[in-house]
Image (cartoon, rainbow, N blue to C red):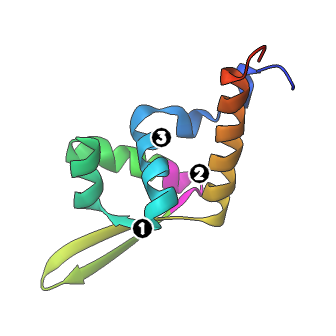
């Protein structure tokens, strides 16, 4: 197995909240802002910053709608995000593998 290379870890995904967002969305497909905020125990401002960073990287798509005069923000993984997360998990598996 190839040796672990720290440069293989995607810095965009590697942050605690961003990793949590990606890990949740890989199974959930989509989640609303409040759901993520509660799940990750994040503040509104902090979560917004991390969602924007993932969106800017093309890893998630953000959809904003108004329902009953309330704003609803939903995050969804993009195909690029799914691929980046798979590569990230492969890099972590090299780190965890014996002799990695």
Residue at figure coordinates x 25%, y 72% from the top left: 72
Left or right side of 45 for 56: right
2 or 30: nearer the eye? 2
Indicate which label's residue lies in the foreground, 2 or 3.
3
Question: Circle 2 sits on which residue?
Answer: 57
The percent coordinates of residue 32 (x first, y second) are: 30, 65
Q: Which residues are magenta?
A: 54-60
Sequence order check, earlier mark of 2 and 1: 1
Q: Quadrant of the C terminus?
A: top right
Residue at figure coordinates x 65%, y 30% from the top left: 92
Q: CA distance from mark 3 to mark 1?
A: 15 Å
The percent coordinates of residue 89 (x first, y second) are: 65, 39
The percent coordinates of residue 7 (x first, y second) are: 73, 25
Question: Circle 1 sits on which residue?
Answer: 30
Sequence order check, earlier mark of 3 and 1: 3
Using the rendered view, name the quadrant where residue 5 is placed: top right
Q: Does the stretch in magenta take in 46?
A: no
* Number of numbered discs overlaid on the protein picture: 3
Q: Please identify the residue farthest to the front as the structure is shown.
A: 98
Residue at figure coordinates x 53%, y 33% from the top left: 14
- The secondary element bearing badge 2 is classed as loop
């Amino acid at each position: 197995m190839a040796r672990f290379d720290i440069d293989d870890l995607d810095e965009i995904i590697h942050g605690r909240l961003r990793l949590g967002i990606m890990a949740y969305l890989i199974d959930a497909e989509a989640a609303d802002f409040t759901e993520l905020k509660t799940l990750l125990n994040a503040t509104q401002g902090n979560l917004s910053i991390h969602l924007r960073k993932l969106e800017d990287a093309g890893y998630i798509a953000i959809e904003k709608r108004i329902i009953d005069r309330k704003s609803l923000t939903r995050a969804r993984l993009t195909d690029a995000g799914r691929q980046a997360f798979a590569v990230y998990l492969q890099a972590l598996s090299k780190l965890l593998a014996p002799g990695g």
